[in-house]
Image: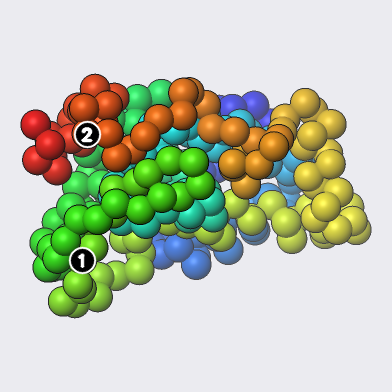
Amino acid sequence: MDIEGFWELVERSARETDNRRARVAWLEDQLSGLTAEEIVDYDAWFTLCANRACSWDMYAVFWTITGFGSSDGFEYFVNWLISLGREAFEKVADCPDRILELPEAQRIMELMKNFSHRRTTWSRDGKFRLKRVTYTRREVWPREDDPEFESFAYVTFEPYKRATGLETDSLGEAVRAQGVHSKFPFLTPLAEPDGEEWNFGDEAEFVRRLPRLARHYGLT
């Protein structure tokens, strides 16, 4: 499977279904009809796409939009970006500051209007300081709109087990045998985000790196 085949499956899964659970099931069904080698290829392409989006600037975008920071949460956010399809992903993968051009991100901003802004605080996470915006929720929005999609990364697991009789650890080994190594979980000795680490609490640096997002949040 080449990159075109990977994106075709990702995008068809959105067209053929109307919710995330059905989308995962559709992909599992499609992948179950492929060879073990093709399933490994799909997983390798998914990993390579996720790696492209694993950067300090994208982490800053994730933190700012969601209001929290965690290694797992960032990974699920990147899964969500991939699920939006090739055009949306390509738009932000190398330029995270374009996030607000995505209709799905604009939808999140609309939903945020149902929140009450309370305060902005600073916290330290590891070696850097992060800006936290705290909100009080007035109503719950549909989970389908959340900017995270954990299970989207797991669609190869059962198809691979059925195709090979092996456990999913073997799938990871097969992907790495192709020379593809995941950057997640990030902030580990073997997996660092791309780019230069920077202090997210430095407003001047935030404006320099993410000027559009900074404008949206009133920093300029």
Q: Residues within 10 Å of mark 1 (few under 14, many from 20)?
A: some
- Position in image of residue 194 (x %, y %): 52, 26
Q: How many marks?
A: 2
Q: Identify residue for label 2.
A: 203
Q: Quadrant of the C terminus?
A: top left
Whole-percent x, y for residue 44 in the image? 69, 35
First in sequence: mark 2 vs mark 1: 1
Q: Residue at x 59, y 33 (%)?
A: 192
Which label belongs to residue 3? none
Query: Alpha-carbon distance for marks 2 and 1?
Result: 20 Å
Residue type highlighted by circle 1 = Tyr
Q: Is residue 212 above or below residue 170?
A: above
Mark 2 Cα shell of 10 Å, populated few (<14), some (14-19), many (≥20): some
| Residue farthest along the right direction in this orientation | 165
Disc 1 element: strand
Looking at the image, what colour scheme do you see? rainbow
- Asked if 191 appears above or below 211 in the picture, the reply is below
Please say if 185 is above or below 2: below
The answer to whether any part of residue 34 appears in the image is yes
**In the image, which disc is placed on residue 135?**
1
- Amino acid type assigned to the residue bearing label 2 in the image: Glu
Which one is nearer the viewer's eye here, 173 or 195?
Answer: 195
In the rendered image, residue 6, in percent from the top left (x then y), is placed at 58, 36
